[in-house]
Image (tube, helix red, strand yellow):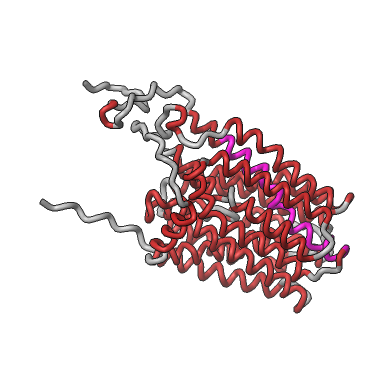
Amino acid sequence: MTQTTPPPTAIPASTTGQEPPPPAPRFHLAWAVAAVAFVTIVGAAAFASLPGLLIEPLHAEFDWSRGTIGFAVSVNLALYGLTAPFAAALMDRFGIRRVVALALCVIATGSLLTVWMTAAWQLVLFWGVLVGLGSGSMALAFAATVTGRWFTARRGLVTGVLTAAGASGQLVFLPLLSWLVERHGWRPAAITVALTALAVVPFVWLLLRDHPADVGLAPYGSKTFVPKPPPVPGAARRALGVLLRAARTGPFWLLAGTFAICGATTNGLVRTHFVPAAHDHGMPMTAAASLLAVIGVFDILGTVASGWFTDRFDTRRLLAVYYALRGVSLLFLPMLLAPAVHPPMVFFIVFYGLDWVATVPPTIALCREHYGEDGAIVFGWVLASHQVGAALVAFLGGVARDVFGSYDIVWYASGALCAAAALMALVLRPKRPAPAATG
């Protein structure tokens, strides 16, 4: 018997091998899970806001070179990316809630230990390794896993919102942390990061759910109830196996290459070096940090809009446009840096903010399109390339500043890289549908 208006999650028990779930409430729990994920990413954004604020204070207190400090930041960024694919597999094995809660505790530990450091290797170990491992375990692969499990409709929009959560956290924490660093030193700022990470743990443990089947629901937008898959053993083996399969395909290398340039020109360059570069031109640290926070405001708008566009337009062309516009803006930046904030700089901040991580929703969609159920883990490896690119520029940007006395060459080189990324996005081809079976 058919119904004219079937409940959104009810299907015959015979198609699942178990009792059908009760009709879904008007408010689907997927939105509550997305909200908890949003709050988690916002709280965790504190540790991503701090590295650019540490360069000058650590250089002044310990006389460490900017290249040395940039190396610690590069280790953090590289581990952030390299941990992500394994974290996605660990979430399949142990569940989202356990992995994210443990990651937040590791971040808090690493941040607290930096308060007592006296040598550069301790900065590399505490901030680079511990905070890098913890942050990588709840990187954008976390957002991809949540959207992949809980949503079939509105995936692009939800991905955009969760991606924008990091910018929201940056908006909240950058002005506060810069004020703490300027008025009270960098140690209170590190303690604030640790306490913020710990404050998010109860929300994750009490409110986050691993799978719609845990509460008897189908994913949002689906009429088919999906039983919870059994835990997948061998997380590391699976992550490496997915990498080996994906590495045999052209789309993987194009996506990894474009996303490496994305990381180089955002986290590695602007997030790490914009504040010290502006300070070189006489701009106060708090003013430069506030500009980065404004980038976070428009990043939210740009990323959510990108998610909406991803549901409706060709993702490859979207990526090409995003990278081309970013490259043009970076070429103009050296001419805009000055002691005071002026209208052209405000225009750059707004423009760059709209484009900051607008690349994420179409990149996740392309991973899902080409690699199906392995899409979240493949995106984890693509994200690893993003962070390797970020790590290289975080380190090389500091070295360039030490050698040339300014960041100008880094801005110009990054603009050229964005032009290459736009061309790579256009080369990427849609996945061909499997040939129909013939009798």
Q: Is residue 147 visible?
A: yes
Residue 64 within the magenta-colored segment of the rendering: no
309 above or below 335? above
The magenta stretch spans residue 54: yes
Instruction: Name the residue nearer the viewer: 41 or 349.
Output: 41
**In the image, residue 278 lies at what x, y percent?**
77, 63
Give the x, y percent position of residue 353. 63, 53
Q: Nearer the viewer, residue 337 or 123?
A: 123
Q: Residue at x 66, y 34 (%)?
A: 202
Quarter-of-image position of residue 72: bottom right
Q: Is residue 41 above or below residue 421?
A: above
| Front residue of 164 and 398 | 398
Q: Which residues are magenta?
A: 35-61
Left or right, 302 with reference to 112: left
Return the x and y of residue 30 as percentages of the image width and height.
49, 33
- Residue occupying the point 83% across, 65% down: 59
Q: Residue at x 70, y 62 (%)?
A: 73
